[in-house]
Amino acid sequence: MTILNQNLTAKLNKYGLFILPQVDVQGYLKFEQGVVVYSNCSLALVELGAFSYVNANSILTCCEIGRYSSLGSFLDLGMPRHILSKITTSSVFYNEFLPLTPYTGGASRDPQETYRQKIKIGHDVWIGSHVLIPANHEITISNGAVIGTGSVVTKNVPPYAVVAGNPAKIIKMRFKDEICEDLLKLKWWNYNLPKFMSQVQDLNLENPQNFIKEFPFLKEHLEPLPNKHYLLKPLAQDKVELQEIIPAT
């Protein structure tokens, strides 16, 4: 457990990472500029895209999150699995993030046992509070999807679907099929729309059809988001290793 102290998190603000008090970072946190993690969250092996946030009291393990996504409070996404085929299901034998090394001796572990199924969350996804996504197999929440409060997600969610329930099922689609397809083609999340809107007030986000029609003409005035990540590895409460990563195009 590595809860980053406030002096350190204040220094991280200049890299576009805003971490509120009492956030536990385990393994690594990979992020783009302009992300927020609210208080009392626990993040292990997490990737966060630009303008996405994780609300308070959420636990995320092995999650890849795109841009402009809004994650609610009290989430439990991708928790470590318990292996049923062994003589015991106790995670002390394979969960390297348990702070029990002084008592276990830090015994070596089979990489296959520590493997976690990744939760892939796309761009412009909204996940309500108290959502559970088990890690018994890989799950993809596609671009534009909405997960209702209190849902248990056990299957992939298609683009722009609204799902809810236990297990979560499709309640409706956000838009008509042709609008969903056009929005996916635009890939508007690759641009800094908030900055553009701070300078030009007449961009209408309330009418998807007009937005789709206008976007090709707007692109030449939009600032692309940097194709750059930072990889943060906690070393202590007041010390991290921070590496800039420019992905291959």
Image (spheres, helix red, strand yellow):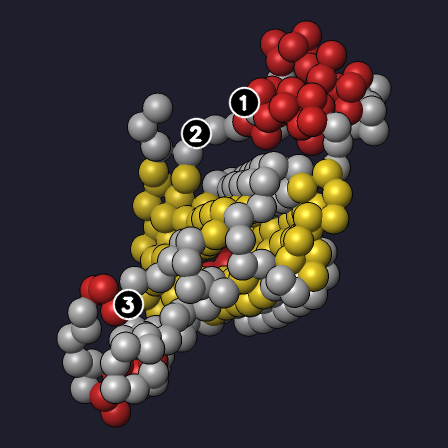
**Separation of disc 2 and disc 3 at Cα?**
30 Å
Return the disc, 3 or 1, that comes first in the chain's sequence: 3
Residue at the limit of the structure toward the left, as seen here:
108
The amino acid type found where label 2 is placed reads: Asn
Q: CA distance from mark 3 to mark 1?
A: 37 Å
Is 142 situated left or right of 72 in this image?
A: left
Identify the residue under disc 2.
Answer: 227
Q: What residue is drawn where x is 63% and y is 24%?
A: 181
Q: What residue is pinned by disc 1?
A: 224
- Which of discs 2 and 3 lies nearer the camera? The answer is 3
Question: Closer to the camera, 247 or 17?
Answer: 247
Instruction: Identify which residue is drawn at 44% across, 63% down.
Output: 135
Q: Specify whether residue 197 is in view.
A: no
Task: Tell me whether circle 2 and circle 1 mark residues in contact (CB < 8 Å).
Answer: yes
For label 3, count other residues whose C-alpha is less than 10 Å away and answer few (under 14), some (14-19) or many (20+): some
Res 88 → quadrant: bottom left
Sequence order check, earlier mark of 2 and 3? 3
Q: Which mark is residue 114?
A: 3
Residue 49: mark in rendering: none
Residue 104 in the image: state x and y as whole percent. Answer: 23, 88
Residue at left offset 74%, top offset 48% = 171
Circles 3 and 1, Cβ within 8 Å, touching? The answer is no
Image coords of residue 218 (percent x, y): 68, 12
Secondary structure beneath dot 3 equals helix
Q: On the picture, is 44 further left or further right than 163?
A: left
In the rendering, at what x and y percent does residue 195 appear?
A: 67, 28
Which amino acid type is shown beneath numbered disc 3? Thr
